[in-house]
Image (cartoon, rainbow, N blue to C red):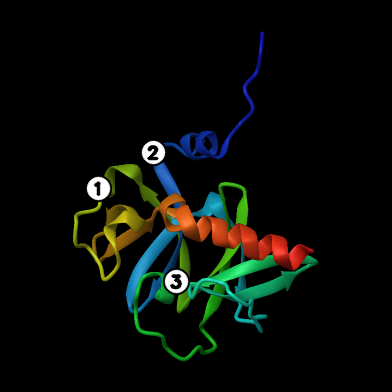
């Protein structure tokens, strides 16, 4: 008899029909990512710029000896930049074996929601490209935009993140 190794998906299933999400704001819109992808949340810190990195990559941070690329989600979504303040945070996530930080305007809360209130993303739900959205949570008082981290970090950007990480580790 074999036993299966638990995965992040199994953990979510064990929570029943709910998702545990970390919610945050960018440009006054509320977004969320699965808490299982989040490693930690940090106050904004000094970034080291990386030559020839894509514009979305603001730089890297050294987090307990590990070099982590940091992406400005405003830049990735094509939104206007704004001055950082004491609410600005870096959410460190792991996606497809890559660890990356996201700069967000403000972290709101950890929020459990029922999967039944999540619907596929319509073509125009926010100021960002719908390819980055996995769904929309319809809460009683607001909409919650669930990010698709796999699409957010795919293609040329994923390669660039790998190159930045490798060049800084050398």
- Which residue matches tag 3? 73
Residue 21 can be seen, yes or no: no
Picture quarter containing residue 42? bottom right
> How far, Cα to Cα, is label 3 from label 1?
23 Å
Q: Which mark is residue 26?
A: none
SS class of the residue under badge 2? loop
Q: Residue at x 40, y 44 (%)?
A: 18
> How far, Cα to Cα, is label 2 from label 1?
14 Å
Q: Residue 17 carries which label?
A: 2
Vertical comparison of 42 with 94: above or below: below
Along the line of sight, which residue is nearer the eye, 155 or 118? Answer: 155
- Left or right, 46 with reference to 136: right
Alpha-carbon neighbours of circle 2 within 10 Å: few (<14), some, or many (≥20)?
few
Nearer to us: label 3 or label 1: 3
Vertical comparison of 134 with 46: above or below: above
Q: Work out whether mark 2 precedes mark 1 in sequence or the reverse, and give the earlier one.
A: 2
Along the line of sight, which residue is nearer the eye, 103 or 164? Answer: 164
Q: Residue at x 35, y 69 (%)?
A: 30
In the rendering, at what x and y percent does residue 1 appear? 66, 8
Q: Residue 119 carries which label?
A: 1
Q: Work out whether mark 2 precedes mark 3 in sequence or the reverse, and give the earlier one.
A: 2
Q: Residue at x 55, y 40 (%)?
A: 8
Nearer to us: label 2 or label 3: 3
- Left or right, 72 with reference to 79: right
Quarter the C terminus occupies: bottom right
Alpha-carbon neighbours of circle 3 within 10 Å: few (<14), some, or many (≥20)?
many
In the rendering, at what x and y percent does residue 136 appear? 28, 55
């Amino acid at each position: 008899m074999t036993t299966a190794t638990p995965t992040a998906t199994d953990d979510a299933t064990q929570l029943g029909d709910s998702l545990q999400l970390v919610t945050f704001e960018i440009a006054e819109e509320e977004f969320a990512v699965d808490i299982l992808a989040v490693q930690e949340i940090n106050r904004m810190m000094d970034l080291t710029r990386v030559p020839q990195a894509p514009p979305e990559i603001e730089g890297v941070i050294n987090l307990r000896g590990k070099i982590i690329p940091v992406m400005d989600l405003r830049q990735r979504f094509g939104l206007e930049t704004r001055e950082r303040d004491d609410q600005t945070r870096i959410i460190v996530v792991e996606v497809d074996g890559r660890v990356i930080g996201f700069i967000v305007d403000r972290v709101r809360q950890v929020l459990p929601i029922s999967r039944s209130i999540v619907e596929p993303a319509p073509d125009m739900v926010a100021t960002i490209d719908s390819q980055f959205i996995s769904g929309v949570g319809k809460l009683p008082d607001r909409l919650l935009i669930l990010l698709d981290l796999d699409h957010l970090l795919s293609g040329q950007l994923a390669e660039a993140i790998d190159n930045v990480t490798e060049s800084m580790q050398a």
